[in-house]
Image (cartoon, rainbow, N blue to C red):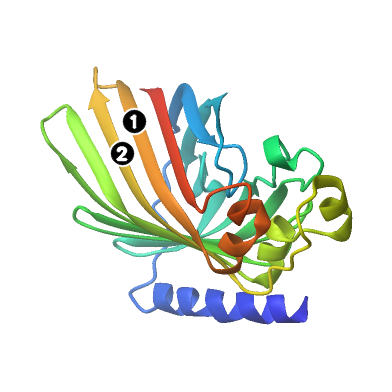
Amino acid sequence: MKNSTQLMSSLVMPLAMLAMAGSVQAAAASNEWSVGLGVGAAWSPEYRGADSHEWEALPWIQASKGRFSLGPVEGLSYDLLAGENWTLASSLSYARGRDNTGALDDFDDVHGSLMAGFLASWTNGPWQLNSDIAGPVTGDLEGVRARGYLRYRGQFTKRLRFAVGPGATWGNGRWNQALFDISARDAANSGLKRYHAGGDYVQGSMNGRLTYLLTRKLSVSAVTQYSRLLGDAADSPIVDDVGDNNQWLGSLAINYQL
C-alpha cells in the first residue's frame, strides 16, 4: 500500500504543478444545465484479453453544471483548477472487474470498483489531450491505474465530424495481478497453469469516432477502438492460451442534446 501511495503521489504532483504553471483561475461556472443522452449498442471482448466478443446495451448520460460534470468515461468530476485551455479535476468513476465467462467460467469473480482520482484535460485548436489517474476504493481491483488519450478533431462536412488518435493505459503490479493472476484454485478449476503477473499493466490503443448531425440536437455516432495488451498481461494464460492480446471494440449510438 505504501508503494502504491508513493507512486500515486509521484504521478499526481507533476500534473498539479503543470496545471498551476499558467495563470490559475477559477473554472468557468455556469448555472445552466447542459445535458446529453444517448442509447445504442457496443461490441466488446467478454473480458480484458478475451478472443470472444459480446453485444451489450449502451445507454449513457453526459451532464454539466458549473464545476460539476458527469460522463460515461470520466464519471463524476469537480473542477479544481482551470486555465485558458486546461482543467484539473477530482473524480469518482467505475472500473469494470473481470467477467468470468467463456474460458474463465470456473474462475473466482473479480468485482468492479469505485475509483477515486484526478482528471486533467488540455485543448489547443483541433487537438485534445485527456488523462486520469485513480485507485480503487471498493471492489476487488487493487493498485493504481493511469490513462491518457490524444485526439485530433475535425469535420469532413458541416454535418460529418470525426476524432482520431492514440491512447494508453498503465497500471502498477497490483492492478495487473488483480486482473491477470491465476491462483492455485483457479488453475485447479480451469486447467490453466498458475501465473503471477509480476510487472506493470500496459495497453496501447488507437481510437476513432464519426458523428453525423441529423439535426442541431440529434446525432448518430460510431466508435471503434483497436488495443493491444503488452508485457505480463499479454503473457498470462488468460490471454496467451485462451484469449488474444489484440482487442477490438465498436459501438453505435444515437445522441440527443437537451
- Horizontally, residue 171 falls left or right of residue 14, namely right
Q: What percent of the width, then of the height, locates residue 240? A: 59, 56
Q: Name the residue located 70 percent from the left edge and 40 percent from the top edge.
A: 103
- Please indicate, yes or no, whether residue 149 appears anywhere in the rendered image: no
Residue at the farthest left position: 157
Q: Name the residue located 12 percent from the left edge and 35 percent from the top edge.
A: 156
- Spatial CA span between label 1 and label 2: 6 Å
- Horizontally, residue 33 falls left or right of residue 8, namely left
* Image vertical order of residue 58 relative to residue 243, above or below: above
Q: Name the residue located 19 percent from the left edge and 55 percent from the top edge.
A: 125
Which quadrant is home to the N terminus? Answer: bottom right
Q: What percent of the width, then of the height, locates residue 97? A: 69, 47
Q: What percent of the width, then of the height, locates residue 55? A: 54, 25
- Horizontally, residue 120 falls left or right of residue 49, namely left
Tell me which amino acid carries mark 1: Ala
Circles 1 and 2 in contact, beta carbons < 8 Å: yes
Q: Name the residue located 36 percent from the left edge and 36 percent from the top edge.
A: 223
Mark 1 vs 2, N-terminal side: 2
Residue at which label 1 appears: 222
* Image vertical order of residue 81 relative to residue 5, above or below: above
* Image vertical order of residue 113 relative to residue 18, above or below: above
Q: Front-most of 66 and 105?
A: 105
**Residue 257, numbered label:** none
- Please indicate, yes or no, whether residue 109 appears anywhere in the rendered image: yes
Residue at which label 2 appears: 209
Tell me which amino acid carries mark 2: Arg
